[in-house]
Image: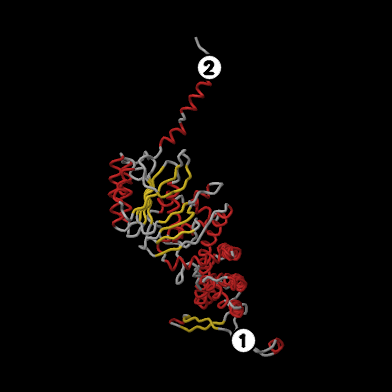
Amino acid sequence: MKAFLMHRERDFDHSGAMPWNERALTQDLELNTLLHAMAGEDELLLEVARKVLLSGFENDVDTISYRQAAMKDCLEHAAAIRELYNLMEETLKTTKKHWWGLSSHYPSSMLYSSIALLEFSLTTFRSLRKIAEEQASSFVSEAFTRLFAMLREELSEDYLATIQDRLAGLKFRKGILLSAELGEYNEGTNYVLRKASKSDLNWLQRILGKGPPAYTFRLADRDTAGPRILSDMQHRATSRVAIALAHSSDHVLSFFKKLQVELAFYVGCLNLRDRLAAKEEPVCFPVSVSAGERKHRFAGLYDVSLSLRMEHRVVGNTADGDGRSLFIVTGANQGGKSSFLRSIGLAQLMMQCGMFVGAESFTAELCPSLFTHYKREEDATMKSGKFDEEVARMSDIVDHLAPNSMVLFNESFAATNEREGSEIARQIVGALVEKGVKIFYVTHLYEFARSFSDKKTESAMFWRAERKPDGTRTFRIIDGEPLETSFGEDLYHRIFDLDEQLENADANAATWPIVT
């Protein structure tokens, strides 16, 4: 039995390796805010959400469409999905708590533990089939229609009743029928468990009738070796059955675990949708295209992590970057550039793992990997300077780059002077674009931005954080060539408003005591 809720032909592997730059992506895109919104207090939801979000680079357009269709079903029938997840959670908690005997090396312990677990699983199977029968007609995605069809076909009541009857027989309430042969030195060998024939006699005939011929022996009261020998014979006869039942139990538990893990992803998405819906933030299912098609356009795109941290809605951005490989974002301080860059990265991750994104509409090409190169705060433990550290991180990224990858730069190479930083950034960015890498670059390095503007590079697009003439920030990103100023005086006047300070000084001077 397979769930197939995240891939058409295989289970989702949540034990795989994470990207080498997991830590940088988590820090720079503030993924923990998003992940905790999806998981709440559920550790499994957190683990699965992190794994799915960061492993989406392996998915193709078909896989993303498959998950999106399943996600739409989940959004329409959230209560049923949560019921399925809770059923798996309670089932696995119970099995973990009570059936430790599956790991035993004694056949009898393995046998009876397996029987108990499988009998308990029958209850879960009946609950699964009931949900499938009630919900099958309302789900339309391939993933869930196939799951519900499998549950109804393979878990029929006749099949479950047969299993229950077989398990009851394996409890050997009427004793064990086995055969054996005499081996070397008259030692027993070839022990085989036999199926006892069912009697066609009614209860009265069984009481009054004559039983089959048999030999009987009794153990002496003080015989200590006899019970051990009989127990050993029983272990040998039931060992194969015990192993087979243990494998069956493992298969059943594996199905429950796989189903829980794959449902966990969708439940996490439901939790996130509820958080965003409570703030009336828009979400949409993105349109993904194959890598290399150079598609990137969106409407109302916003930073989901920022929205989750704030009480009010955040500003979204609209742009059309189709056909471009280089996007340079400049403009005033505190104008929303970094939040916009995060929104680009988060939307890419969410799209590639099959989720909805925080936007009114979103279309983008897939990328085989995503990298972030953000400025870092000064670290007293660094063995070299801040600029050396930036270059070293850039070298690591280059070692892992592939064509059509995406790199997000945020104030990179600003640790040195304007001329050197601009020249280094220009050479690196030029080389990456030439190799087919898509780049979003937030910068205050005017010389760097102007170098691409002057060239009129067809693959480059320029955005600017909007600033009103009076200095007001709208937190929107608009089309615009880089300006020579970043309006640092706005920040200066905000902190050191000279007119206000002089007025306060004059007012205070009238009340200051005169000291002679």
Question: Mark 1 to mark 2: distance in Å?
Answer: 111 Å
Q: Nearer the viewer, mark 1 or mark 2?
A: 2
Q: Give the colouring mode of the picture.
A: secondary structure
Q: Quadrant of residue 420?
A: top left
Which secondary structure, mark 1? loop
The residue lying toward the viewer, choosing from 176 and 140, is: 140
Residue 219, position as x, y percentages in the image: 59, 77
Residue 389, position as x, y percentages in the image: 32, 44
Residue 312, position as x, y percentages in the image: 56, 47
The kind of residue tagged 2 is Trp
Q: Could you tell whether 205 is left or right of 290 in the image? A: right
Q: Quadrant of residue 435?
A: bottom left
Which secondary structure, mark 2? loop
Would residue 219 be seen by someone viewing this image from the given angle? no
Mark 1 and mark 2 lie on one chain; the one further toward the N terminus is 1
Question: Mark on residue 306?
Answer: none
Q: State the residue at coordinates (49%, 81%).
A: 191
Judging by the rendered image, the residue that carries numbered circle 1 is 198
The residue lying toward the viewer, choosing from 40 and 375, is: 375
Judging by the rendered image, the residue that carries numbered circle 2 is 512
Q: Quick check: marks 1 and 2 in contact, CB under 8 Å?
A: no
Measured along the vertical axis of the image, is residue 380 above or below residue 175?
above
